[in-house]
Amino acid sequence: MQVWRDSARRLRTHFFQRNTFQPGHRVRLLYNGTDYFPLLLEEIAAARHEIYLESYLFEADDIGRRVVAALAAAARRGVRVRLHLDGFGARYFPSHWQQELADAGAGLLFFRPEIKRLSLNRARLRRLHRKLAVFDGRVGFVGGINILTDIEPGHLNLAPRYDYAVRVEGPAVARIRNAVQRMWRQTALVQLEQDWVEKSEPLVVPGRFYGPTSAHFVIRDNLNHRHDIEKEYRRAIRYAKREIIIANAYFLPGYRFRQELRAAAERGVNVVLLLQGQVDHFLLHWATRAYYRRFITAGIQIYEYSAGFMHAKVAVIDGEWATVGSSNLDPFSLLLAREANLFVRDGELADELRADLRRKMDKYSRRIEAERVSRAGWALRALVWGCFALVRFMMSVTGYGGRRYLE
């Protein structure tokens, strides 16, 4: 009976997998803001009907200035512009930029604006962490790149911020457009803005074959898609045969995710993690290291990127499956935030991403060996386990994650 159940589960999984990836996409991998911002500005300038742009951070720097100016210019020529920012991440968005967009006729909303800074309401932890853009229902951008310069202020000696995004054409763009429109209407409804009843006219996009890539756009929210991104990762890990490379800036996944990784390593899959080497978010940075010994003992390789601040959230499996998006593999992204990833099946794109990840590991990262973990002094061990205990305590207090998330 158990054998029959296992076979049925595998059949259901394979059926679901085949039917979630749609063919006919053209996907271009973008490296850092150097690739991303020129293309983003180019699409803003070329838009004729509508622009949706979501971002967690939107800094008052040269990049932010250029994007605001381009959006205002688009609105003045009659393009329907909707800029949706997180109320915490973009809380310092300049008031004169807000006025400039309003005068041009562009829409601007802040998701969950920070009104009570000292509030203990756990709902304020649910942020809009997605980085999405859609132009005329024709082209979409998905990734981890916020609207800010790649050079970290105060750290001019470090390499530019390390991140990825993708430019996509094809059937998935309609799903991206639907996601940003729905999110806009939800925020407008909560804030009693008139846009919640506003209906966009369907855009007629030529139904042509764009390219050879199969793609699947996946979101995470707190309603119907609470674990969709994590499940897509775990499904791919479970069926990996040769290699898994995950590059993630903030890596503190739950129990089942870690079990899938260890099981893959035990069956002979080469599992490699590329993680943040610079201290960015202090608590998560050190709490993550509580798992290093167990990962290394299971045969998992760990590299720390040390040339600069790493913001990437990507993975490649078996040279044919890849993902690029906004979701970290930590409690904030997996349990709280609105996230979005594009999952693709394309050997050429997967090879391109894998080659860049390997280059980052070989030239700009250090491998964490078992001996180094064993030689850690008592002060470092106390720091790691203290941070880990604090993360567990915070999750317990807020009620997120369930009892087994960090076991």
Image: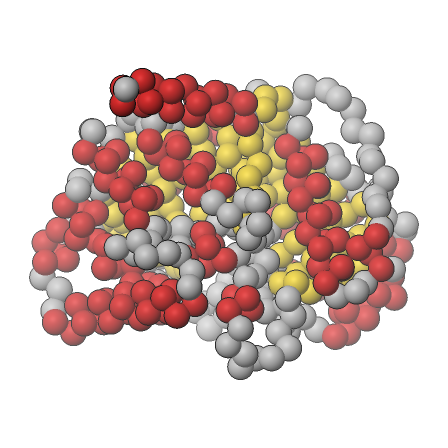
Quadrant assignment for the C terminus? bottom left
Front residue of this view, candidates 341 and 69: 341
Of the pair 230 and 404, the residue shown nearer to us? 404
Query: Looking at the figure, which quarter contains the N terminus?
Result: top left
The residue lying at 60 percent from left, 47 percent from top is 36
Task: Identify which residue, 90 or 126, lies in the foreground.
Answer: 126
Looking at the picture, tell me which residue is in the foreground, 39 or 206: 206
Where does residue 96 sit, x and y in percent of width and height? Answer: 77, 74
- Residue at the extreme bottom of the image, as rendered: 118
- In the displayed orientation, state which residue is furthest to the front: 1
Tell me the residue at 43%/39% (across/down). Answer: 231
Q: Seen in the image, is 394 located left or right of residue 201?
A: left
Q: Is residue 394 above or below residue 263?
A: below
Query: Residue placed at 66% from the left, 63% from the top?
Result: 111
Quadrant assignment, res 148: bottom right
Question: Which residue is at 32% across, 57% downward?
Answer: 403
Q: Is the residue 158 above or below the residue 120 in the image?
A: above
Q: Relative to 339, is 390 on the left or the right?
A: left
Q: In this view, does 185 lie above or below 269?
A: below
Q: Can residue 39 be seen from the camera position used here?
A: no
Q: Give percent across and percent down for residue 292.
A: 21, 53
In the picture, residue 167 is in which quadrant?
top right
Please state if 208 lies on the left or on the right of 121 as rendered. right
